[in-house]
Amino acid sequence: WRSILIMPERNGKVTEREYRQYFMDRFKEYAVSQPGSFLAGLAAKSYRFFSSREIPRNYDIYSIRPYSKVISALTWKRWKFGFPFGLILPLALLGLYTGRRRVPAPMWLFLILYPASVILVFSASRLRAPLIPVLAVPAAAGAIFLIESLVSKRLRIFLPASAGLLLTAFIISAGGPFVTERHDYSAELHACVGYQLSRTGRSDE
């Protein structure tokens, strides 16, 4: 990773504009010369983006769980299933489908353009986080639809909807573990905390 970061400098690119242009040129060159590989990479990144688990970048949110009861309760994984995204996304898809006529255009635009902008770069949990509050709204609508179907005993609706939720949760959980999930991020966690403490004049801590 660090070798990639200093590639522009090795090629005489020193300003920020030259730095960004160098990587943009490499990107265009790759997409044009190897379109099949480029599209396959986008497909793989799309699947990681919608994985039920939180995919690390340079730190892993799961490594924080021992230090926070709140995070421990709200963010966890069992087998390959990740909570809460493994529940929020299937419910949100149900809510978006059943209430599609009431979903405002700006929400559709965000739900399409924001994931696309992340997938074009790389998928990681902290980049996906802004999507979750928006998905929570249709997810709540999907949960209400499911509960009302059960209470009113409309099993012809409840059973297929429940099966769809389970199938979606399985699909977004089945892949992996991906390469970035196979590392122990304890050192990175302590390094990040230490860096922030140092920035705020608490170097002794």
Image (cartoon, helix red, strand yellow):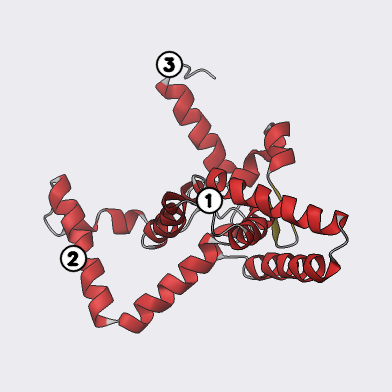
Q: Is residue 142 left or right of residue 6?
A: right
- Residue under numbered circle 3: 201
Residue 195: percent from left, percent from top: 45, 30
- What element does badge 3 sit on? loop
Category of crowding for the residue at label 3, using alpha-carbon neighbours closer than 10 angstroms: few (below 14), some (14–19), many (at least 20): few
Locate the C terminus by quadrant. Answer: top right
Comparing 77 with 168, the one in front is 168
Q: CA distance from mark 3 to mark 1?
A: 29 Å
Locate the N terminus by quadrant. Answer: bottom left
Q: Amino acid at mark 3?
A: Gly
Q: Amino acid at mark 1?
A: Ser
Category of crowding for the residue at label 2, using alpha-carbon neighbours closer than 10 angstroms: few (below 14), some (14–19), many (at least 20): few
- Residue under numbered circle 1: 125
Residue 197: percent from left, percent from top: 48, 23
- Residue under numbered circle 2: 25
Q: CA distance from mark 2 to mark 1?
A: 27 Å
- What element does badge 2 sit on? helix
Q: Amino acid at mark 2?
A: Asp
Q: How many marks?
A: 3
Q: Is residue 92 left or right of residue 1?
A: right
Q: CA distance from mark 2 to mark 3?
A: 41 Å
